[in-house]
Image (cartoon, helix red, strand yellow):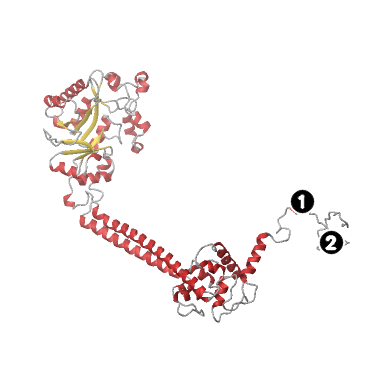
């Protein structure tokens, strides 16, 4: 539908291509809302991006006729290519892929056209072969500068890498271990001291634990002693009874009291073994036999007198600490403990006295007890030490050897791992306190023991093998990089391309101009090789 005159009647005839009415006047076509806001590409036309691509493609690929030598053009590559004598500039037979490559080069030139220097003249067109030669010299100089920077970085990285490798190769010379020795120089195996008996096989500080320690060939039974309110020494480590007894069930109102607040009759009512089966402090509890489980359930808190009698029958020594050291009646605790030792009839040389409090009084009353100190010897020691008991972290291998040379017995605690026991064995320690007496008993020699010559040979062979592996990796990397290198990049380094032409007398310029036929394959070689020319 159409109308003439000054008024325009909307028409929905979308098929009229000429948009004219009957009288020759222009007819306005109103699109429905659904079609009005569609993208232009969806409506059958070209969007702005497509039109821009078309203009760039036409301007770069040159819809104009071939240029004469020395003339200028919008494309610097076309100008420099035309400046070469005898070169034919034509666009015949250009594929769509090559056109897209040219378009990308053109866009790159637009982005980098603001860079100063002779390269900017290439972006706007060169006027003569001399100008092209000057621009190409600048390109070559800039590429060589970047190449020099990359070479410097590579050299620095190589030096750092070589320094690290040399340090790693020489590190074994500074590594020492007590177990690097001849087998003939190996000291005797350290004696085992049962930490509260055999706590992995029975409840700690019980008669069953003492017996299990004896079965593991333990030479010393280590325990802790407290004194009850009525003056009876008994075996207990914690100041409270909650962890190792059922005091909360028997005496709930007094469960939080100190162990020394209970009478011996009250302590005898407590169960000292069921907690071991319920809490399972070690994984070895699961492997207990049915008979051992029944015996565990029958355990009670033993007195020091009972422990001394069991140690006397088993012919093992006993070492204990008297707790708590800060108690107000500590001196009475010492007297009660000494009385229990003297009444038990155990040989005094089998008792190792560890408490530091009132040591002089103990020496006067029982001079046959072996005094064990929980410290290192002093420089001005009045009386030489014969036994020390320290954590294994506090003693170095050199100190252990020195104490051994001075006939000082060194006991270190608590050692459970075989590798740690092996190191201390090689160091010459006298004994170790352990929870895993059943494991360390089976060790007949250290885990590893190497002569110094064998140790050095192992490291030399390892270093040689690793060096060969590194050299092989570098050679393989170089070979792979040479395979990936395109043939056009070799032309930049001096090898001429087949069918290329050069300007006589300009070696660096000719290398660039050899790759100037831009609308076929060599266009990417100039972009890769030069790196400073952008189109």
As drawn, 135 above or below 405: below
Percent across and percent down for residue 297 are 33, 28
Q: Residues within 10 Å of mark 1 (few under 14, many from 20)?
A: few
> Could you say which disc has been placed on residue 20 in the image?
2
The answer to which quarter of the image holds residue 250 is top left
- Quadrant into which the N terminus falls: bottom right
For marks 1 and 2 on the same chain, the one whose residue lies earlier in the sequence: 2
> Could you say which disc has been placed on residue 101 in the image?
none
Left or right of residue 261, residue 189 in this image: left
Question: Tag 2, which secondary structure?
Answer: loop
Residue 212 is at least partly visible in this image: yes
As drawn, 369 above or below 401: above
Percent across and percent down for residue 441 are 24, 42
- Quadrant into which the C terminus falls: bottom right
Q: Residue visible at 45% across and 79% down?
A: 505
Percent across and percent down for residue 120 are 53, 66
Left or right of residue 365, residue 493 in this image: right
Camera-nearest residue between 227 and 396: 396
As drawn, 81 above or below 251: below
Camera-nearest residue between 315 and 466: 466
Camera-nearest residue between 158 and 473: 158
The answer to which quarter of the image holds residue 73 is bottom right
Residue 347 is at least partly visible in this image: no
Task: Name the residue beneath numbered marker 1.
Answer: 33
């Amino acid at each position: 539908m159409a109308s003439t005159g000054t008024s325009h009647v909307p028409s929905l005839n979308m098929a009229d291509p000429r948009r004219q009415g009957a009288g020759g006047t222009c007819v306005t076509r109103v699109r429905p809302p659904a079609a009005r806001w569609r993208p232009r590409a969806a409506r059958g036309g070209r969007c702005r991006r497509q039109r821009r691509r078309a203009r760039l493609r036409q301007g770069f690929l040159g819809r104009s006729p071939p240029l004469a030598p020395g003339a200028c053009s919008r494309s610097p590559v076309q100008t420099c290519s035309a400046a070469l004598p005898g070169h034919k500039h034509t666009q015949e037979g250009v594929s769509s892929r090559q056109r897209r490559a040219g378009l990308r080069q053109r866009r790159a030139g637009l982005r980098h056209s603001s860079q100063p220097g002779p390269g900017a003249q290439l972006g706007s067109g060169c006027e003569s072969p001399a100008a092209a030669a000057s621009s190409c010299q600048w390109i070559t100089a800039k590429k060589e500068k970047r190449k020099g920077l990359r070479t410097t970085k590579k050299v620095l990285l190589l030096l750092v890498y070589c320094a690290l490798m040399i340090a790693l190769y020489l590190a074994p010379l500074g590594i020492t271990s007590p177990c690097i020795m001849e087998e003939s120089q190996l000291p005797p195996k350290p004696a085992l001291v049962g930490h509260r008996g055999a706590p992995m096989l029975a409840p700690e500080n019980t008669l069953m634990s003492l017996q299990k320690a004896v079965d593991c060939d333990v030479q010393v039974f280590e325990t802790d002693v407290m004194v009850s309110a009525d003056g009876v020494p008994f075996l207990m480590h914690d100041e409270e009874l909650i962890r190792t007894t059922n005091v909360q069930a028997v005496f709930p109102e007094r469960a939080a009291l100190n162990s020394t607040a209970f009478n011996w009759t009250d302590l005898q009512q407590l169960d000292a073994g069921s907690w071991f089966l319920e809490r399972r402090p070690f994984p070895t509890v699961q492997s207990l036999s049915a008979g051992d489980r029944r015996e565990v359930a029958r355990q009670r808190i033993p007195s020091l007198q009972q422990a001394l009698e069991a140690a006397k029958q088993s012919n093992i020594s006993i070492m204990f600490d008297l707790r708590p050291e800060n108690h107000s009646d500590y001196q009475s605790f010492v007297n009660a403990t000494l009385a229990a030792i003297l009444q038990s009839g155990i040989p005094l040389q089998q008792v190792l006295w560890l408490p530091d409090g009132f040591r002089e009084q103990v020496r006067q009353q029982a001079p046959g007890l072996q005094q064990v100190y929980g410290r290192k010897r002093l420089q001005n020691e009045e009386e030489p030490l014969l036994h020390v008991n320290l954590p294994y972290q506090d003693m170095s291998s050199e100190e252990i050897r020195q104490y051994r040379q001075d006939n000082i017995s060194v006991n270190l605690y608590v050692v459970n791992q075989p590798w740690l026991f092996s190191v201390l064995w090689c160091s010459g320690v006298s004994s170790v306190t352990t929870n895993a007496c059943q494991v360390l008993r089976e060790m007949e020699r250290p885990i590893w023991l190497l002569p110094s010559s064998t140790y050095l040979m192992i490291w030399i062979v390892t270093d040689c093998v690793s060096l060969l592996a590194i050299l092989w990796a570098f050679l393989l990397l170089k070979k792979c990089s040479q395979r990936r290198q395109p043939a056009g990049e070799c032309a930049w380094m001096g090898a001429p391309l087949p069918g290329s032409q050069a300007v006589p007398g300009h070696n660096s310029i000719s290398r660039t101009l050899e790759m100037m036929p831009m609308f076929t394959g060599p266009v990417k070689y100039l972009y890769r090789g030069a790196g400073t020319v952008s189109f």
